[in-house]
Image (tube, coloured by chain):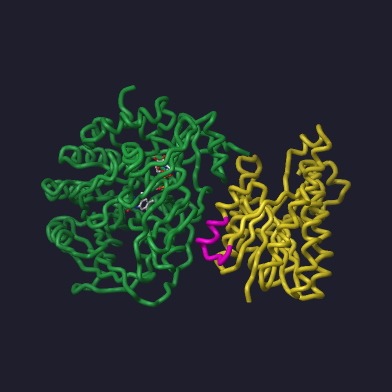
């Protein structure tokens, strides 16, 4: 059948939508739907909030349009349908010496989803966002026509589609530039950082290609902001990675699983696992880039009520002061989970609404317990006041006022999206909640 | 030894998943389906995934003229020729009841088409002295039910043919696997009410591959359907005829 009546949710499982969903297996089936009923496309639903939800109409799930269309081994340019997953690209092409130039923390994300949120990876400071590595995009427009976009052709629409939250049309396929990789292993060095200032200093001076910090969001006082810095370089090791089998979380975890005492004990052990002088390990690319993917449905660990994720990026000038205040509030609240990341970001603006700016990004999960929403709302305001940005792929609680001043190119983008989609067929729960499309 | 897989119905979700699996092992694939343009894209996909050659060719179970070019393509390949058959169509039984001639399409797609195709291929496999045929039947072929008995009858006929062909090809070193899938998550079952324990096409493709390697005769996929169907088959007809399962 074409349509399925279904309830679906963002990765955080707090926000949900009910509606009709189609999951075409051929591009022609999709164009068929569009002649009558243009509606937003969604990928693997790995956005945490409501970026991929449409309570007000239909949606098209792209995951079955997942074929490689062509690959040029001389240049590393890959053309693929939008539903291809990042893991599929990595595991197919890394044995041939190529990998995606930018990868988010989950390999389940689709090519289309990575473009629409213009995702960043552990190499953002050097490599920019996903959108910096796109040759061209094939876009199905609201009127059923297909346009090819690139830096030379339809270039405004090209930029508006990168990080454009699906508002310009459905990405059918794209040509992306892969980067060479010498093996399927990666050398990872881990070092402790005992305080926030030390941590930020280490991130700032790191020269590693891949660099990411795990942060102990339960630490207080002089240990506030302590964590572990991971720096990694591709190697030429000949070892074939031993991939562990994925496991499933069969049911929602009880609420004590991630309660404050459990998290404190876990975080302490996790921190102390790294010897004081640091250590180096060889990991498979999959283990390093997608550490959580081995546990399918890990979002169920937060129990039935789900969880919120908060991610902000702060400019260098305000970062230390704001991060200190944020971490103080978070550790005092006792609501933090072990999943907390601090990263350095570089500059770049592949799309009008691209999230990262030069500075630092902090990302954390909070179980949807009492007080969590208040805490996150406060963090959103701190971000806005510090001249930072929140990340649409993660957000479920920001307000139109929070985001109003965050993206200087918002007005230009609204104009381009308005021309591409005059009837607002592609609006999602997120764009409606945050009034991103602007006034009609 | 080079392996070639002919995949009939290559643009179905199961056919696609199986073709990728075969490509990943380094086999040449001949992808046959009605929608040639879409099949070309699948062929490109298989090439990226490791197939030394991936050829798209038009195939229509209702048009016997479309068979010969595929035999010729296969004959031109060295080594072992294998075939996997993923075709079939399942209109609403109510539509067939209203328009009995519709049943003929179902029978051609699920029974006479694949049977005639395989019959024309069998001698090539005998000549080569090797090769496996994987035929996708259905649990619906195990017992006629009010909801889809024309489809079920076509599949039951196909099952019987496959067992005969197995008997024949065994003598020359070939093999035939009969597959009875339960519910698989494809465009055909998307949004249908009453689906449960739905398997992904990738899971099914893996099961098929393993069954071919182990030279299984008949498999249910996922495996527990064997027991579900055991129960359904053991219901006395006196009772069964009044049920709507
Ligand atoms: C464990 C985990 C780790 C993560 N780590 C990172 C990280 O390190 N960096 C980072 O940047 N993000 C990260 N993310 C977020 C994730 O990468 C993004 O949310 C990504 O967009 C998800 O892709 P998806 O295919 O699931 O898209 P969805 O979440 O389904 O959709 C996302 C958006 O893309 C649009 N969209 C999807 N497909 C299309 C299409 N074909 N055409 C047009 N629009 C489309 C949707 O409308 C929606 O607006 C992480 C998420 C998880 C769960």
Where residue A315 sits: x, y (%)?
Answer: 16, 46
Quadrant containing the N terminus of chain A is top right
Q: Is A413 in front, or is A288?
A: A413
A87 lies left or right of B16:
left
- Relative to A13, is B122 above or below? below
Question: Which color has been applied to chain B in this rendered view?
Answer: yellow
Picture quadrant of residue B4:
bottom right
The chain letter corresponding to green is A
Work out which residue is located at the far top of the displayed protein and give it.
A440
Q: How many marks?
A: 0
Q: Is residue B52 magenta?
A: yes
Q: Is residue A244 magenta?
A: no
A204 lies left or right of A151:
left
Quadrant containing the C terminus of chain A is top left
Residue in view at x 80 percent, y 61 percent: B120
- Relative to A27, is B203 above or below? below
Where residue A333 sits: x, y (%)?
Answer: 24, 47
Residue in view at x 21 percent, y 72 percent: A278
Work out which residue is located at the far right of the displayed protein and give it.
B238
Residue A254 shows up from this direction? no
Residue in view at x 56 percent, y 65 percent: B51
Where residue B41 sits: x, y (%)?
Answer: 55, 52
Picture quadrant of residue B16:
bottom right
Where residue A320 sits: x, y (%)?
Answer: 13, 50
Q: Which residues are magenta?
A: B43-53
């Amino acid at each position: 059948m074409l349509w399925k009546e279904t309830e679906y949710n963002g990765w955080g499982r707090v926000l949900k939508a009910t509606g009709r969903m189609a999951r075409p297996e051929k591009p022609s089936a999709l164009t068929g739907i569009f002649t009558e009923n243009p509606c937003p496309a969604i990928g693997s639903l790995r956005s945490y909030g409501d970026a991929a939800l449409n309570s007000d109409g239909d949606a098209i799930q792209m995951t079955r349009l997942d074929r490689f269309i062509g690959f040029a081994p001389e240049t590393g340019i890959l053309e693929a349908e939008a539903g291809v997953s990042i893991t599929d690209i990595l595991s197919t092409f890394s044995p041939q010496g190529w990998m995606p130039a930018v990868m988010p923390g989950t390999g389940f994300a689709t090519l289309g989803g990575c473009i629409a949120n213009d995702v960043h990876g552990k190499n953002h400071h050097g490599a920019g966002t996903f959108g910096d590595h796109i040759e061209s995009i094939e876009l199905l427009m609201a009127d059923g026509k297909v346009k090819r976009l690139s830096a030379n052709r339809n270039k405004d629409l090209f930029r508006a589609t990168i990080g454009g939250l699906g508002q310009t049309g459905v990405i059918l396929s794209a040509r992306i530039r892969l980067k060479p990789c010498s093996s399927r292993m990666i050398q990872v060095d881990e070092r402790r950082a005992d305080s926030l200032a030390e941590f930020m200093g280490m991130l700032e001076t790191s020269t590693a290609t891949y660099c990411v910090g795990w942060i102990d969001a339960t630490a207080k006082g002089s240990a506030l902001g302590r964590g572990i810095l991971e720096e990694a370089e591709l190697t030429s090791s000949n070892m074939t990675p031993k991939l562990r089998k994925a496991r499933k979380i069969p049911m929602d975890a009880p609420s004590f699983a991630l309660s404050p005492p459990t998290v404190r004990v876990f975080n302490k052990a996790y921190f102390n696992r790294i010897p004081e002088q640091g250590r180096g390990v060889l990991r498979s690319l999959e283990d390093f880039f997608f550490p959580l993917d081995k546990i399918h449905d890990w979002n169920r660990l937060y129990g039935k009520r789900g969880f919120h994720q908060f991610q902000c990026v702060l400019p260098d000038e305000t970062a230390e002061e704001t991060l200190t205040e944020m971490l103080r509030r978070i550790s005092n609240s006792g609501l933090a989970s072990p999943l907390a990341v601090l990263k350095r970001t570089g500059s770049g603006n592949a799309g009008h609404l691209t999230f990262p700016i030069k500075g630092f990004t902090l990302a954390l999960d909070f179980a949807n317990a009492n007080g969590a929403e208040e805490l996150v709302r406060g963090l959103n305001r701190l971000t806005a006041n510090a001249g930072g940005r929140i990340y649409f792929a993660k957000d479920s609680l920001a307000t139109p006022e929070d985001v109003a001043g965050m993206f200087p190119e918002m007005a230009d983008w609204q104009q381009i999206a308005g021309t591409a989609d005059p009837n607002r067929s592609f609006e999602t729960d997120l764009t409606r909640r945050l009034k991103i499309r602007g006034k009609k | 030894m080079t392996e070639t897989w002919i995949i009939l119905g290559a643009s179905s979700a199961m056919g696609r998943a199986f073709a990728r699996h075969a490509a990943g092992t380094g086999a040449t694939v001949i992808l046959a389906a009605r929608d040639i343009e879409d099949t070309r894209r699948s062929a490109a996909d298989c090439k990226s995934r490791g197939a030394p050659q991936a050829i798209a060719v038009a195939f229509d179970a209702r048009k016997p003229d479309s068979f010969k070019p595929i035999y010729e393509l296969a004959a031109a390949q060295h080594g072992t020729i294998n075939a996997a058959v993923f075709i079939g169509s399942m209109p609403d039984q109510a539509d067939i009841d209203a328009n009995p001639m519709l049943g003929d399409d179902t029978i051609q797609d699920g029974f006479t088409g694949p049977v005639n195709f395989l019959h024309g291929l069998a001698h090539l496999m005998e000549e080569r002295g090797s090769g496996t045929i994987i035929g996708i039947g259905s649990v619906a072929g195990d017992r006629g039910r009010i909801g889809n008995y024309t489809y079920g009858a076509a599949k039951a006929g196909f099952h019987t043919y496959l067992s005969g062909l197995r008997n024949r090809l065994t003598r020359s070193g070939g093999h035939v696997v009969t597959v009875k899938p339960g519910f698989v998550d494809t465009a055909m079952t998307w949004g249908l009410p009453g689906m449960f324990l739905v398997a992904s096409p990738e899971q099914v493709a893996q099961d098929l591959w393993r069954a071919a390697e182990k030279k299984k005769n008949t498999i249910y996929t996922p495996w527990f359907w064997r027991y579900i169907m055991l129960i359904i088959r053991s219901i006395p007809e006196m009772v069964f005829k009044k049920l709507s399962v």
